[in-house]
Amino acid sequence: MLRRTILLLLCLAALLGVTSAAPAVAQDVPAGLLPSAGDGLDLEPAVEVAVPSEATAPDVQGIVLAFNPSGPGRCEVNISPWPADAKAAVTRAAAIWSSLLNGSQPIVIDVCWSPDFAANGLLANCGSRTGTFANFTGAPLANTNYPLPLANQLSNSDLNGGDPEMQCRFNANRPDWYMGLDGIVPASRFDLISTALHEIGHGLGFAGGVAWDDGSGSAECNGTRGVGCYSTIPDVYDRFVQTSNGTSILSLANNSMALGSALTGDALVFAGPNAIANNGGAAPRLHAPATWVAGTSYQHLREDTFTAVATGLMTPAMPAGTAIHHPGAVALGMLKDMGWTIYDLSITYVDKSNAGLENGGVLHPFNTAIEGVSAVPFGGRVFFFAGDYHENLTISRPMTLESIQGVVRIGQ
Ligand SMILES: [Zn+2]
């Protein structure tokens, strides 16, 4: 076992501008989680190639990153210039999400390279823009608040006009970012792609509208220590959260100790059918430790349960030296439960010559090996059109790589 530093990712739910300290913690992380195939990987032609039907829904029209935009409510005034490598890493994270999501509406994300982080060393924070987006045309559930990027897809319109849908801030003061694209992260560095992927995941829906009241300072609920509360129009995420005995948290009384205890009882699950199916038939556990940490508790998968790279992106802590370049099937199942249309990417296609639309289907293949490998879930298959792919490829979960025809060579 290799002891590595872990930093908690602070993530904002629906309330931008609220931060809280998150301590650095240490955890044993198995060494060798990330076998690398960067030195040249030859694929022999497949004897038999199954060609599934092309996905029919259009790709999400792209995640559009606005780097350090100025103006009210955008990035801070005293913002740091984006390093080129950092831009490339965040762009890669956006491309991974874009490849996974269907929809008609672009998602504009303000991305701020911010020196204005507290000294506690948080990596980043992110959230959907504030506001209540409920009961719009196309909303699957009534009286339910949807994260803005999802609300736009479901309504097939741009509900917030020209404003951005999400804001993500990255700590410009950290000297230990790893900004490479290859997922080969030195043990003491934090992978920016993985961090950005995680943070964007919050803006897409990994957030909820519940709070736990600490009884001091500003009242999170009714000012009574230990009570829990939710909004009168809860977030779609909240609709799926249950206690381990199947009780919806929204059936517990608002501003009650019973709800507060549930939020800190380490027994919450996300009981959506797709999440359950993608988690081997069990509702995935959520992070609900005895000590409530705003921005960390409740809106992540449980840290000590989802330790594998294939499912670990949306846990609260990101170990140094680790790359996770795919949300994982459990997280994608949760997003599907919330209303996202996710491609069936159990098989993806890669063709380096494709210069057009990419969604991983056979008609619109990804044009890099990294995209194809990143998108396919645990146990999936990636088909390559013949050619040389000059990429350093990291494979972090079991999958099958096959050639459509001819020789595929991967590596630099
Ligand atoms: Zn997070």
Image: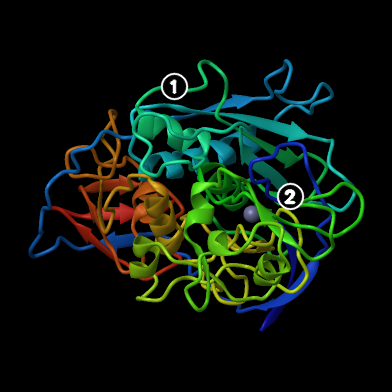
**Residue that numbered label 2 is attached to:** 123
Is disc 1 placed on a helix, strand or loop? loop
The quarter holding residue 330 reads: bottom left
**What residue sits 71% from the left and 37% below the top?**
16
Of the residues under marks 2 and 1, which one precedes in the sequence? 2
On the picture, is 147 further left or further right than 293? left
Three-letter residue code for mark 2: Leu
Image coords of residue 194 (percent x, y): 58, 52
Q: Nearer the viewer, residue 242 or 409?
A: 242
Image coords of residue 328 (percent x, y): 44, 61
Q: Is residue 261 above or below residue 219?
A: below
Whether residue 189 is visible to the viewer of this picture, yes or no, is no
Label 1 CB-ligand 1 distance < 8 A: no
**What residue sits 44% from the left and 43% below the top?**
97
Q: Residues within 10 Å of mark 1 (few under 14, many from 20)?
A: some
Three-letter residue code for mark 1: Asp
Is disc 2 placed on a helix, strand or loop? loop
- Kindly report which numbered mark, 2 or 1, lies closer to the viewer in this rendering: 1
Q: Quadrant of the N terminus?
A: bottom right
Q: Is residue 375 above or below residue 379?
A: above
Q: Is residue 303 above or below residue 374?
A: below
Q: Residue furthest bottom?
A: 1
Image coords of residue 28 (percent x, y): 69, 79
Q: Nearer the viewer, residue 136 or 2?
A: 136
Q: Are marks 2 and 1 in contact (CB under 8 Å)?
A: no
**What residue sits 45% from the left and 39% below the top?**
95
The quarter holding residue 266 reads: bottom right
**Residue that numbered label 1 is attached to:** 158
Q: Nearer the viewer, residue 85 or 22?
A: 22
